[in-house]
Image (cartoon, rainbow, N blue to C red):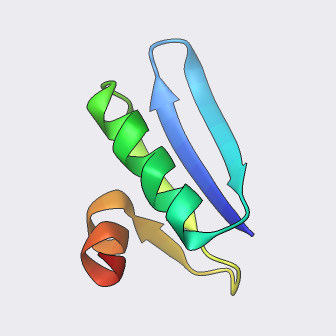
Amino acid sequence: MYIVKATSHAGPVSFACGTLDQALDRLADLSSRGFQEVSVKDPKGKEWSAAAFMTAFL
């Protein structure tokens, strides 16, 4: 499971994504909506910045 984390003006949020494609879609959505500090934790426990994750898997 991928965990996508981000921060908005209302505070931190987390989303659980079952697949790589869902995580990529959520990253794109949160980034386009102005969320900050967007990151992903992959199933192996490695934490990625949004830019690094999208570069590695797109």
Tell me if 33 is positioned left or right of 27 in this view.
left
Residue visible at 29% across and 72% down in the picture:
52
Location of the N terminus by quadrant is: bottom right
In front here: 17 or 10? 17
Q: Position of residue 19 (x, y in %)?
A: 65, 69
Tell me if 2 is positioned left or right of 11 in this view.
right
- Looking at the image, the residue that sits furthest to the bottom is 44
Residue visible at 58% across and 52% down in the picture:
4
Q: Position of residue 35 (x, y in %)?
A: 38, 30
Q: Position of residue 9 (x, y in %)?
A: 45, 14
Residue visible at 32% across and 38% down in the picture:
31
Location of the C terminus by quadrant is: bottom left
Kindly indicate the quadrant of the structure image that contains residue 43: bottom right
Q: In this rendering, is residue 19 above or below 29?
A: below
In front here: 37 or 56? 56
Kindly indicate the quadrant of the structure image that contains residue 2: bottom right
Q: How many marks?
A: 0
- Looking at the image, the residue that sits furthest to the top is 10
Residue visible at 69% across and 87% down in the picture:
44
Tell me if 55 is positioned left or right of 12 in this view.
left
